[in-house]
Image (cartoon, grey):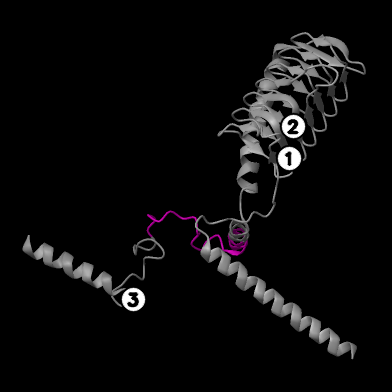
Amino acid sequence: MASLGARTVTAVSGAARSLGKALDSMGASMEVAKYTERLVPSTRIVAVDGVAPTISETAAFIAPSANVVGNVTLGPNSSVWYGATLRGDVNSITVGTNSSIGDRAIVHVAKIQGDHPTAIGDNVTVGPGATVHAATVQDGVRIGPMAQIMDGATVGANSIVAPGAVVTPGTSVPSGELWSGNPAKSVRKLTPEEIAEITDEAISLAGLATLHADETAKDYKQLAQDEEDYEDKMQRDPEYWQKDTPDEEDVLGQGAPGRIFNTPLTNPEEGLKVKAAKKKSAEE
C-alpha cells in the first residue's frame, strides 16, 4: 500500500512538473519584452516614500546581495560590494566618483539626534564591515575594516582611519593624517607615498568591480557556456586547432578551420560562386 502511494505521489509530481514547464514555455512565447531570469534574484535598489536611488549609468558595480535604499546617489565608477547597505531613508547619502563601499559595510544617515546626511567624496575606500553614520568623508580617504565614523564627524581629504578605529560624533579629522584607536586620535602625518596609495587602491578596486559586474550579470545560459568553454580548453590538445583562433588564420593552405569543407559537395552555393567567378573572368 505504501509502495502504491509512493508511486502515485511520484507520478503526480512528475505531471505537475511537466505542466509547470509547459506553462512557463507558453508564458515566454507570449512575452513582448523578453525576460532574462538571473541566477541571483535581488532587491538591491529600493525606493522609500517614492524616492529611489540615483545610480550613475557608469557605476562600476552593485553586488546582488547589496542594498541601496532611498535617497542615495552613487557616482561614476563607484561600487557597493557584497552584503553592504546604503540606507538613505531619513536623509540623503551621496557617494562620489571612483569610491567603493566594502563588503558588509553600513552607510546610514540621521534625523532624530540631528539633521545629518552622509557625504562620501571621490576616491574613497570604505573597508569591509566599516560604518559611516551621518558623517562627511572627503576625497581620497581610506576607512579601514570595522572602523566607525559617527554622527556629525568629518574626515578630511587624503586621510586614513585605521581598522577598528572609532571617530566619535562631531569629531573633525584633519587632512593628511592617520587616526587610530577608540576613541580615534591623531597618530601622525601621512607621507606623500601613502596618500598616493589611497588613490591607487581606489582605482584598482574600480577595475576589479567591473569584473564582478560582468560575472554577476550573467544568466544560466552564459554560465553553462563558460563551463563548456573551460572544459573544452582543459581537454583540448595544445597542438590541435583552438576555438579562439582568429577566423582569418590559414591551416595547411586550405583556409580557416570550419571553412575547409565549404565545397560544392557539401554547400552547393559554393559551386555557384565558383561558376560565377569563372564566367566573370572569361568575360574580362
Look at mark 2 in the image and give the residue it sits on.
86
- Quarter holding residue 151: top right
Q: Quadrant of residue 222?
A: bottom right
Earlier-in-chain disc, 3 versus 1 = 1
x%, y% of residue 216? 65, 47
Closer-to-camera residue (112/185): 112
Q: Secondary structure at mark 1?
A: loop
Residue 102 visible within the image: no
Please name the residue shown 71% across and 24% down the image. 92
Q: Would you say the magenta stretch is mainly helix, strand or loop? A: loop
User: Circle 1 sits on which residue?
Assistant: 66
Residue 276: which numbered mark, if any? none
Residue 85, position in %: x, y?
Answer: 76, 35
Alpha carbons under labels 3 and 1: distance apart: 54 Å
Amino acid carrying label 1: it is Ala
Q: Is residue 16 above or below residue 137?
A: below
The residue type indicated by label 2 comes to: Leu
SS state under label 3: loop
Residue span colored magenta: 228-250
The reply to whether the C-beta atoms of the residues labelled 2 and 1 are less than 8 Å apart is yes
- Residue 60 percent coordinates (x, y): 61, 35
Secondary structure type for disc 2: strand
Residue ID for mark 3: 266
How many numbered discs? 3
Left or right: residue 20 compared with residue 147:
left
